[in-house]
Amino acid sequence: MKCSVCSNEINEKYCSKCGQYFKKERISTRSIVTDLFGNLFSLEKSFFKNIKTGFFQPNILVANYWNGFRGYYYSPSKFLVIASLLFLIQIMIFNDFFGIVVNSIAAQQFTLPIVFVFVLSVFSFVLYLKYKRSFYEHLILNIYTVSLWSIIFVPISIVLNLLNAHKAIETGFIIIYLLLIIIWDSKVFEMNKLKQCIYVALNCLLLITVPLLFSKFG
């Protein structure tokens, strides 16, 4: 096995050249929980370096984790924790911190990204079925993409709130946020631009029609 970062041969679990950890097993509930609690606060690379990789090369970031390599890039749980902390800061600024538990607006702000992760994972699992990735792998993909764009967008959202931006601006802001997540999901899979546009359009269609169907028949 060759290291995905420096192409050095891996003899055991670590690359002797760059120190990246390799674990040859499929992603499961156990592996996600272990990663969340076992490696939560270890920082192997700088924050901005990881954001840059996720922004310009999401396929490398996600595929690296899918293929069992650990330790060189941030894990999805680290991205999620950073995004959650930013959402918490937003709640603390614009809501009564001591009333967070009973404040429905704050609860929505904090739980919405988790809902997005699950819903978008279901959609991407269905749409990209031919790529033969498990639901857990799609879950990892969307934790990365939702967290990445939350880390970028939440600070902008805080500024818009401080400036008392119009409701239409906030709505457009959320639409752009979701669209970028969907586009970045498609970038992880190897396909030409035409196919990528088709998959993005189908994902957007699902995102619009499924809630409408639930509201109509629910």
Image (cartoon, helix red, strand yellow):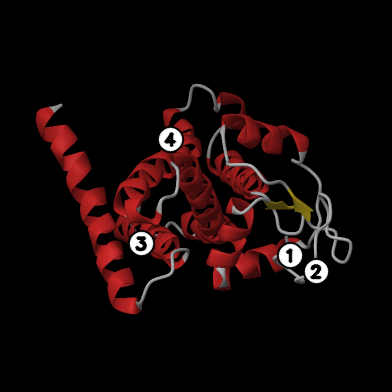
Q: Position of residue 34 (x, y in %)?
A: 70, 33
Give the position of the C terminus as an image quadrant. Answer: top left
| First-in-chain label (4 vs 2) | 2
- The residue that label 3 is drawn on is 179
Q: Secondary structure at mark 2?
A: loop
- Residue 8 — which label? 2
Q: Amino acid at mark 2?
A: Asn
Q: Secondary structure at mark 1?
A: loop
Q: Residues within 10 Å of mark 2 (few under 14, many from 20)?
A: some
CA separation in Å, label 3 and label 4: 20 Å
Residue contact at pointers 2 and 1, CB within 8 angstroms:
yes
> Can you tell which of label 1 and label 3 is closer to the viewer?
1
| First-in-chain label (3 vs 4) | 4
- The residue that label 4 is drawn on is 108
| First-in-chain label (1 vs 3) | 1
Q: Residues within 10 Å of mark 3 (few under 14, many from 20)?
A: some
Q: Amino acid at mark 4?
A: Gln
Q: Position of residue 14 (x, y in %)?
A: 83, 53
> Can you tell which of label 1 and label 4 is closer to the viewer?
1
Residue contact at pointers 1 and 3, CB within 8 angstroms:
no
> Can you tell which of label 2 and label 3 is closer to the viewer?
2
- The residue that label 1 is drawn on is 2
Q: Residues within 10 Å of mark 1 (few under 14, many from 20)?
A: few
| First-in-chain label (2 vs 3) | 2
> Can you tell which of label 4 and label 2 is closer to the viewer?
2
CA separation in Å, label 1 and label 3: 35 Å
Q: Residues within 10 Å of mark 4 (few under 14, many from 20)?
A: few
| First-in-chain label (1 vs 4) | 1
Q: Amino acid at mark 1?
A: Lys
Q: Position of residue 155 (x, y in %)?
A: 57, 58
| First-in-chain label (2 vs 1) | 1
